[in-house]
Image: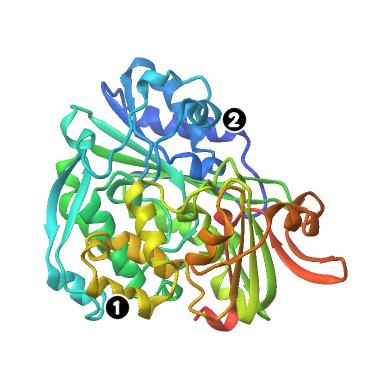
Amino acid sequence: MFFSKQASENKILESKDINDLLYKALYSLGPQKRVLAIPPDKTRIHSRAGEITQMIYKFYGNNLTDILPALGTHAPMTKPDIRSMFGDIPFDLFRVHDWRNDVITLGTLPGEFLNDISDGKVNYPWEAQVNRLLRDSGHNMIISIGQVVPHEVAGMANFNKNIFIGTGGPKGINKSHFLGAVCDMETIMGRADNPVRALLNEADRSFSHLLPKILYILTVIGNDDKGNEGVIGLFIGDDKVCFYEAAGLSMKKNFTLMDKPLKKAVVYLDPAEFESTWLGNKAIYRTRMAMADNSELIILAPGVNTFGEDPEIDRLIRKYGYRGTKHTLDMVKKNKDLNNNLSAAAHLIHGSSENRFKITYCPGGLNREEIEKANFEFANLKNMLKKYPPEKLQMGINKINGEQIFYIPNPALGLWSEKKRFK
């Protein structure tokens, strides 16, 4: 075991602090001939993983042979995306994770195990899949970089999720996401231990010996006493200790518990981060436990121009829409295309209000017919940006034009819940 950390609830780490702790850890591990770095993609641009990857590149030079962004099911990063997040690292070091084709199966966990961890909700075997680059390209160390933050599928993001989901294949991703959905997202979000994490931990225990040594570099992002945002925790290790330490800090800084539920919330989706509802529905996932019955969630989404991150998932979302757990599970039973894409089914469950509150989407690139067919309300983006101008709103409660709203400038950075809904 190896573990190093620097963390504070109220102080932001400077780049020099991060660099010094990182280099101290890398020096202690000795020389490495071939290193594979697995950072997140642009959907975690605030994680500081881009800067940390630059530090790793400067440390190892030519011995950092490959960088594989953990796309999961997301679309590949463009060259401008890479340059914006990773600076001047050469483009020829970056590899694209093809989650449908370029994977291998390390092993399979039995259905009995999934039956146990899900209290009988699923009973299928689970294939531990990763990109073939992890096993077959002669690396002697993998460095997995990422942010620990509340997450709708795994409870808390990152650690071995970055490996088995971020570089995973269709069977592993579909079945793990569906496991989380049927086990009730609202009992999973914000919890480090849950059925999905139990699955990932067991896969780690059973199959990680088939891969090179993995070093995890985990950040926690938060605000200092003056409201400035940055890295408040850096955790480095090769087992679950660093993850659980990071998760503990993230729960303190990234989770907002409220005495009363919200009657109206407005969430802004940065167009540089969110171009699809597949990603943009974080606005729903992360606020669902905070919304009052018969309330309204307004999503300002100037960059959203599609539903899915690939053509097949986009087609499935358009076909079935966000109509809640009961309807979606019924469609899974009756339709082979959705049954073969269980991560899409899970996403449809996650992105629904379960008919408890109204979701009004204001997209930059989808029309009224498309949005309403997906079972959302539609509003004109230009009009809503005038009514709720992000540049005039502060995180939290605002009064604008005599109306009280709760404003969230980036749902990816936290989780919000009414106290009585989080038990």
Q: Which residue is mark 1?
A: 330
Would you identify the image quadrant in which residue 368 lies?
bottom right
Residue 16 has which mark? 2
**Residue 408 point in image, percent of width and height:** 67, 59
Whether residue 349 is situated above or below residue 166 in the rendered picture: below
Q: Which residue appears at 36% of the width and 19% of the height? A: 92
Q: Earlier in the sequence, mark 1 or mark 2?
A: 2
Mark 1 touching mark 2, by CB under 8 A? no
Q: Which residue appears at 39% of the width and 17% of the height? A: 61
SS at badge 1: helix
**Mark 1 or mark 2: which is in front?**
1
Badge 1: few (under 14), some or many (20 or more) residues near its Cα, within 10 Å? few
Q: Which residue appears at 16% of the width and 50% of the height? A: 207
Residue at the outermost right position: 402
Q: Is residue 178 visible?
A: yes
Badge 2: few (under 14), some or many (20 or more) residues near its Cα, within 10 Å? few
Q: 369 or 242, which lies in front?
A: 369
